[in-house]
Image: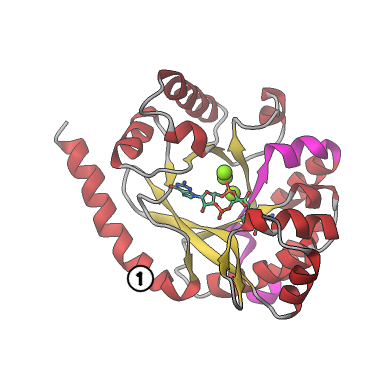
């Protein structure tokens, strides 16, 4: 269900869009690497609404910039008060990929909030890349010049070619969760994930496994050489108020789990 424009306009003015944060974890050590910022609509009567139900309408109405600016403001403000080694990954809508001013906008939010550019990972999806190849190239190189990292999100679901992966200065490669979730039952998925991780490694990219829900998936990814994991196993997206809990709980539990299992192999 896509919310209608009038409701979204009201919600923007009422400041109802907020960032949630989902942990990214170093698979080998269990250490927290950072969080992905995921937009939520805290609706005054309907409760929490996921991004797929409002981002498309916001894009269509031309409000995605305004929406994202608010999300980034809030997220970086919060980010400025978490430990300095932690990064924040932010999602850029395909529609924003034809806006050459985007890197400058991110820089200005970084400066306003005091959340340093070198702690920001900008996630671009394959469709964002392919839809606006020329401006995407300039946006990615500007972001890199300003000190951000850039990740290719949902890899394997779109139509980018290996040429783009190779010619654009990406830092991270995020393996789409559809492959990770079907690894257990499908040999082909397992092979695809292994190949993508190998490809990322040989291009010098940090690979991130998305949608890690089970210990088995985490171990399989680690074994294939994947560096970072993200998914319900490590933690669901949480509001800012829950960040201290996540940071306190996560590290010991996960590192114990993985290293213990590896030691017994
Ligand atoms: P994404 O960037 O690929 O984000 C990962 C999605 O997978 C998130 O869904 C997250 O909640 C979900 N996820 C994480 N771990 C697991 C897991 O273990 N199992 C399962 N089943 N799902 C998991 P979410 O938050 O609903 O976001 C959906 C998409 O909406 C995102 O996909 C992203 O493309 C877009 N999005 C989210 N926030 C923003 C935003 O601020 N701006 C823009 N432009 N797009 C956003
Ligand atoms: Mg993402
Ligand atoms: Mg993703
Ligand atoms: Mg995804």
Which residue occupies the foreground of this view, 70 or 213? 213
* Residue 208 image point, x, y percent: 49, 41
Residue 217 visible in the picture: yes
Q: Which residue is mark 1?
A: 245
Residue that appears at 67% across and 32% down: 158
Question: Is 132 covered by the magenta stretch?
Answer: yes
Q: Is residue 220 rendered to the left or right of residue 231?
A: left
Residue 119 part of the magenta-drawn span: yes
Rendered residue at 81%/64% (across/down): 63
Q: Position of residue 159 (x, y in %)?
A: 70, 28
Quadrant housing the C terminus: top left
Q: Residue furthest left?
A: 264
Residue 167 in the figure: left or right of residue 217: right
On the rendered structure, is 61 left or right of 114?
Answer: right
Decide if residue 103 is in sight here.
no
Using the image, determine if residue 135 lies above or below residue 235. Answer: above
Q: Position of residue 120 (x, y in %)?
A: 60, 58
> From which residue to which does the magenta span run?
111-134
- Bin the neighbour count of mark 1 within 10 Å (Cα to Cα): few under 14, some 14-19, many 20 and up: few
**Dot 1 lies on which element?**
helix
């Amino acid at each position: 269900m896509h919310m209608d424009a009038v409701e979204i306009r009201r919600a923007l003015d009422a400041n109802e869009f907020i960032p949630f944060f989902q942990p990214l974890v170093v698979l080998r050590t269990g250490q927290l690497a950072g969080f992905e910022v995921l937009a939520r609509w805290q609706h005054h009567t309907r409760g929490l609404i996921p991004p797929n139900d409002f981002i498309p309408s916001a894009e269509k109405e031309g409000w995605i910039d305004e929406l994202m600016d608010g999300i980034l403001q809030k997220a970086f403000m919060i980010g400025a008060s978490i430990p300095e080694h932690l990064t924040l990954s932010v999602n850029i809508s395909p529609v924003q990929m034809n806006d050459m001013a985007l890197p400058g906008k991110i820089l200005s939010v970084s400066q306003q909030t005091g959340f340093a550019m070198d702690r920001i990972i900008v996630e671009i999806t394959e469709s964002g890349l392919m839809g606006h190849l020329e401006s995407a190239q300039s946006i990615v190189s500007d972001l890199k010049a300003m000190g951000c990292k850039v990740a290719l999100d949902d890899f394997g679901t779109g139509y980018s070619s290996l040429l783009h992966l190779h010619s654009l200065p990406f830092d991270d490669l995020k393996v789409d969760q559809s492959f990770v979730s079907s690894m257990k039952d499908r040999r082909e998925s397992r092979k695809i994930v292994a190949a993508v991780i190998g490809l990322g490694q040989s291009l010098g990219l940090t690979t991130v496994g998305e949608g890690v829900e089970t210990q088995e998936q985490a171990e399989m990814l680690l074994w294939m050489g994947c560096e970072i994991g993200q998914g319900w196993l490590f933690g669901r997206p949480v509001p800012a108020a829950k960040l201290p809990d996540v940071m306190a709980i996560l590290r010991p539990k996960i590192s114990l789990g993985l290293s213990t299992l590896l030691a017994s192999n």
